[in-house]
Amino acid sequence: MAASAKKVEKLKESTLIWMDGKLVPWADAKVHVLTHSLHYGVAVFEGIRCYPQPNGGGAIFRLREHVRRLFESAHICLMEMPFTKDEVFEACKQVMIANKMNEGYLRPIAYYSDGLMGVGAVNPVRLTIATWFWGAYLGEEGLKKGIRVKISSYTRMHMNSDPTRAKVTGHYLNGVLAKREALMAGYDEAILLDQQGYVAEATGENVFIVRDGVLYTPPVAGGILEGITRESIIRIARDKNVQVEERRFSRDYLYCADEAFMCGTAAEITPVREVDDRRIGAGEMGPITREIQSTFFRAVRGLEPRYTEWLTPIEAPISAEARA
């Protein structure tokens, strides 16, 4: 068995998953094949990261904001959550502690269970929280040198056809198809345009560009997901006296940017060096991107006192033996 396969097997054997108020082993975390959300795509979820801290413990990044957005997504979708925000907040911490992890990716997901079928059926809502180690989503090299991006032939859905503010599983068909199209064409990621042809977002990330020292990002009112990492970057930039404007821009404006980057919980801050075979700026991470990325990584690891309110400590230091 390959080393990577052994690592996966060890993870499955050792990981505990929180399901409806109980911690269960990976192998017992199951749902029925007739689970309503599996068939109709109505489930809401979050992606949250926990980062190691100087004391050897861990801290979850902007946990309260993520839990709030989970509940807002459920509210938009008319889902009655079976737990309170505080209970979900504590459950996320519990999952990290139970798995003796000071670093990892958390995935809370609320979904309609099995029972009745049909578009109009409303089954009981279940809630699951899992965690696993997830490195650089777009690659370690991408974090340092930047990625190649393609403008997708798929369009970001309109806010009146889908509730774009909600983080809903069904929405991600849009991103999956765009991502596969980009990968098959030899690119690392895709950017989707909105219904009017303006830059919207990537398949799982928000988009920023720099031009003449000003940081631009598409407005939430244009139908993008209101990213928590996005909001963090806006604050970091303004704290550094970088002018930030939320405004629409076209793909050709993106082509002529001095710098560009993507951000999200999984992707963190990943520079873009090329779009549609057009070099962005110098074809490498630009100075403003580098400064924001550096500050962000220091902040999530507890090295920037200004942003400590973003961090939720999960436990006293965890030994290396416990993490092994």
Image: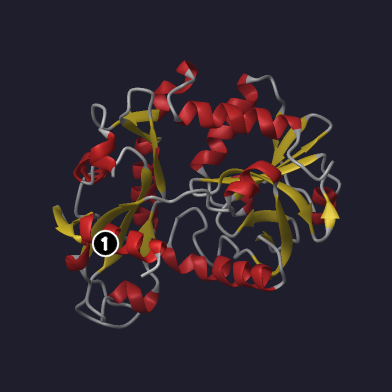
Image quadrant where residue 90 sits: top left
Residue at image position (26%, 80%) is 33
Instruction: Quadrant for the C terminus, please.
Output: top left
The percent coordinates of residue 113 (x first, y second) are 23, 71
User: Circle 1: is it few (<14), some (14-19), or many (20+) Cα within 10 Å?
Assistant: some
**Residue type indicated by callout 1:** Lys
- Give the farthest residue toward the left: 22
Q: Is 181 on the left or on the right of 4, as rendered?
A: right
Residue at image position (51%, 26%) is 298
Vertical comparison of 105 with 44: above or below? above
Q: Is residue 80 visible?
A: no
Q: Is residue 181 visible?
A: yes
The percent coordinates of residue 31 (x first, y second) are 22, 72
The percent coordinates of residue 32 (x first, y second) are 22, 77
Residue at image position (39%, 38%) is 65
Say how the picture is coloured.
secondary structure
Instruction: Quadrant for the N terminus, please.
Output: bottom left
Residue denoted by label 1: 12
Residue at image position (77%, 31%) is 214
Q: How many marks?
A: 1
Vertical comparison of 215 with 189: above or below? above
Closer-to-camera residue (279/321): 321
Image quadrant where residue 143 sits: top right
Closer-to-camera residue (113/119): 113
Closer-to-camera residue (160/7): 7
Q: Secondary structure at mark 1?
A: helix
Closer-to-camera residue (7/271): 7
The percent coordinates of residue 121 (x first, y second) are 27, 77
